[in-house]
Image: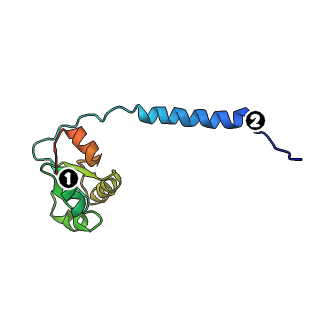
Amino acid sequence: MSIRKRLPLRAVAIPAAVAAFAFALTSCAAAPEPIEVAPGAVLLDVRTPSEYAEGHLDGAQLLDFNGGELAAAIPSLDPEAEYLVYCRSGNRSGQAIALMQQAGFSHLTNLGSLEQAASAVGIEIVR
């Protein structure tokens, strides 16, 4: 004879409801606010050269974060300029911005991924 315990309905229903609510919130997220690219602002792509070659924002400067190019270039960059930084997912651009902030840069915007960046600034992806 088999004895099976049944979970109370609320033990299953509450986590399922929370998960459904969280999914609904993320799937209905608003589009990013448009960002105006000021004259002289620098679009900075911190992905790898191969990622850049697959597609990048028109006019973006490549400084590979993982390859150390960004860290090496920081002393030669203008700390007063505005930098709009993007990568593949927003992770490396966030790390790049943290590194630049430590070096005294203050006009920094994390655009997230390439697609998010293109949408936010309205600049074409060059492939």
**Where residue 122 sits: x, y (%)?**
18, 38
Type of amino acid under label 2: Pro
Relative to residue 73, is residue 65 drawn left or right? Answer: right
Q: Nearer the viewer, residue 19 or 2?
A: 2
Quarter of the image for residue 116 reads: top left
Instruction: Give the residue number, with chain letter if any, for mark 2.
Output: 8
Q: Tag 2's secondary structure?
A: loop
Q: Residue at x 27, y 68 (%)?
A: 67
Badge 2, how many Cα within 10 Å: few under 14, some, many 20+? Answer: few
Q: Residue at x 82, y 44 (%)?
A: 4
- 32 in relation to 102, above or below: above
**Where residue 10 sits: x, y (%)?**
70, 33
Residue reaching furthest to the front: 1
Q: Nearer the viewer, residue 81 or 37?
A: 37
Mark 1 vs 2, N-terminal side: 2
Badge 1, how many Cα within 10 Å: few under 14, some, many 20+? Answer: some
Relative to residue 31, is residue 62 drawn left or right? Answer: left
Residue reaching furthest to the right: 1
Residue reaching furthest to the left: 39
Q: Residue at x 75, y 39 (%)?
A: 7
- 50 in relation to 120, above or below: below
Instruction: Give the residue number, with chain letter if any, for mark 1.
Output: 55
Counting the numbered discs, the total is 2
Type of amino acid under label 1: Gly
